[in-house]
Amino acid sequence: MKINAANTKSSGSGVQRLLAFAALIVIYVFFAIFGNNFASASTMLNILSSSYYVGFLAIGVTFVIITGGIDLSIGAVLMCSALIGALAYRDWGWPLWIALLLVVGVGTVFGLINGLLVTRLKLPPFIATLGTMMVSLGFGSIITNTTSKNYPTINEADNWFGRVFLKTDVTLFGKSFDFPTAAVWLLVFFVIMLFVLNKTKIGRYIFAIGSNEEAVRLSGVKSANWKCIAYVISGFSAGLGAIFYAATYSRVIPNTGNGFELTAIAAVVIGGTSLSGGVGSLTGTIIGVFIMSILKNGLVSISLPAPYQTFFTGLVVIGAVMLDIYRNKKANKVKIH
């Protein structure tokens, strides 16, 4: 008797989520002991701040990876969307709230383009999204004439931007502190996407496509449409991530954003989502996001130069992919006679 491979992979994914959570605790404790002022409230806020935009990217790309695809464009699309929104606000005189809608719209359009390239033109996801990554990088630079663009800071007229999308002052029991409003937005988005993935037809078909797309197609379901939706969700999430990146750093620089997609994809794989498709968890993805953020801030706390930070982050990415490959090989070999 042969064990169902999908069930075996799902079980392995659950084990990996537990391991990822344990790794999260171990890594935090390590840097709290050996890092400089790592366990402080300010460092925790820095960890949260560097998790926001990556969290949105990772949640969106989880849907794509579950289908068995990949989206390499999300980092560049995030920066392109943020640049166009800032251009609309600063140079075109648009109200900020409309410019922010444009940011999300640009990200969603790029997601739709990716979906159509993959499902209609039958391009491999790697090639399609690599091309979109290059297009969005170039387009962001062209439309802004390779000049940096800024969003409102706390001292400007539209200072509601930072209070709504990053943090706001709160007084509790006579003490004032910064409340991370962005964390609330990320939590709300996570809960909504968790419901979509696990409780709706969209999620069921996305999992089914990742497990066996041909079977889904032969059953009469238009698998191309549902797969395209996964890429649209990824682009939409990149647009949202652009807003929170802008709120966190204010200044957006053309020709940047490369590497964000690798951090997000690594977080997804660390959290137990399989690169071969059919298995995934948004809870695991969020755990992976915080592992990457703690690693980034922890390496700074032990005074490692930037090249070392890049080096160790790369090792984590390689390790996550190797773990996924090992898990898939093990799942495919498991049999009961």
Image (tube, rainbow, N blue to C red):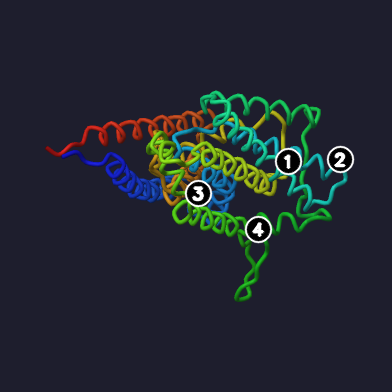
Type of amino acid under label 1: Arg
Q: Which residue is drawn at 55% across and 51% down?
A: 48
**Quadrant occupied by the C terminus:** top left
The answer to which of 19 and 333 lies nearer the viewer is 333
Q: Nearer the viewer, mark 2 or mark 3?
A: 3
Question: Element at badge 2?
Answer: loop
Measure the C-alpha gap from mark 3 to mark 4. Answer: 33 Å
Q: Residue at x 62, y 55 (%)?
A: 182
Residue 269 located left or right of residue 232: left
Measure the C-alpha gap from mark 4 to mark 2. Answer: 26 Å
Q: Name the residue under label 4.
A: 167
Q: Name the residue under label 2.
A: 91
Q: Which of marks 1 and 4 is nearer the N terminus?
A: 4
Label 4 crowd (10 A; few <14 / some 14-19 / many >=20): many
Q: Quadrant of residue 276?
A: top left
Q: Name the residue under label 1.
A: 251
Q: Name the residue under label 3.
A: 202
